[in-house]
Amino acid sequence: MNFYLLSLIKAAVVVGVLMLMLLYLQWIERRVIARMQVRLGPNRVGPLGLLQPIADSLKLLLKEDLIPPGANKALFVLAPFLAITLSLISISVVPFGPQVTVAGVPTWMQLADLNVGVILILAISSLTVYGVVLAGWASNSKYPLLGALRASAQMISYELPLGLTVAAPLLMSNTLSLRGIVASQAHYYWGFLPAWNVFRLPFPQVIGAAVFTVAAFAETNRVPFDLPEAETELVAGFHTEYSSMKFAGFFMAEYSNMITICALGTVLFLGGWLPPFPGLDAVPFVGPLFWFLLKTGVLLFIFMWVRATMPRLRYDQLMRFAWSFMFPVAMANLLITALLVAWVG
């Protein structure tokens, strides 16, 4: 099989699977939250409500697509397209598994391996704020504009602790390649404890993983940091004026960012596709892709769990938490990691 044809097939498979995950991640979240809050989730459209995401998609597709008077039409249309496009680009450098052979052609379970893959993801994530800001400004309405301003301040503030916590595993792995980061974790202490960065000596990144997770909630505008779309204060925030598939674009971008940030956390802190104990790859139907999806799924479940149980913060609490707690802790974690890596090395 031609290498370029195989690359196109891999891209089509990844996009298709990701679109399906975006469609049904909403159903899973609604069912999980309903179970936690002792109520019914979607259960009418299809068995167990499995067709509910399709019904919601059809409803959004058939709704009237409105553009408010006075809006900047070009930017109003561009904003959701920019949000969903940027959210999908980052997944292209995330490795899902080791090298495999397809039709005689060796290939990695990854669309593109860059020597600076981590930098690309951080750069793309910093650009996603433009989709939110453009949506709020182009709507020509005060509530979307307030939501957009909140989003820009929040995402810029929490990018600092997020970047600092990402830098700590890079120091321990001595590479910016996501594939190289996974390879650096491919051994075990005392024959059973995985050398994932969250357990890795000389300084296990437990604090770094915790700060990364909290910052990920803020970066994806999830509860308890969903201030840019606080419906009790801002109607629906930056996407108040959006309807039909343009609204669906922001909805898909949020879940796509969740998947990407959880996949990145899996690679940085949880060993990527590596099994938790040696020898588990020999179990039938349990391969590297299974472990990667399992770890990413656990992190996604934490997102849903927090949404079901925690209230929203006030905006002053959100910003104070970022600058007075998250930033100093992330900086201290990075400095201690750097000192210990230099000392051991």
Image: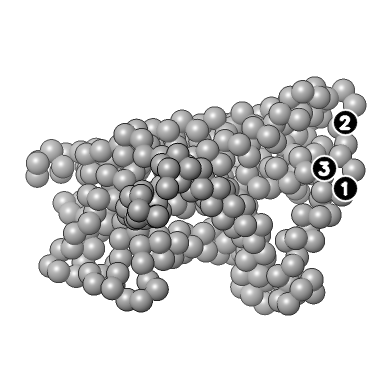
Q: CA distance from mark 1 to mark 2?
A: 15 Å
Which is more toward the observer, 23 or 235? 23
**Three-letter amino acid code of the residue under disc 1:** Lys
Left or right, 200 with respect to 298, comes to: left
The image shows residue 266 at horizontal and vertical percentages of 39, 54
Is 226 placed above or below 28 here?
above
Mark 3 sits on what residue? 243
Mark 1 sits on what residue? 63
Q: Given this view, does label 1 or label 3 mark the residue nearer the observer?
A: 1
Q: Is residue 234 visible?
A: no
* Residue drawn 30% across the image and 60% down it: 274
Q: How is the image coloured?
A: one colour
Q: Earlier in the sequence, mark 1 or mark 2?
A: 1
Whether tag 1 and tag 3 are in contact, CB under 8 A, the answer is yes
Q: CA distance from mark 1 to mark 3?
A: 7 Å
Q: Is residue 255 visible?
A: yes
Kind of element beneath mark 1: loop
**Three-letter amino acid code of the residue under disc 2:** Pro
Q: Earlier in the sequence, mark 1 or mark 3?
A: 1
Q: CA distance from mark 2 to mark 3?
A: 10 Å
* Residue drawn 35% across the image and 62% down it: 288
* Residue drawn 40% across the image and 73% down it: 285
**Three-letter amino acid code of the residue under disc 3:** Ser
Is 117 placed above or below 9 here?
above
Kind of element beneath mark 3: loop
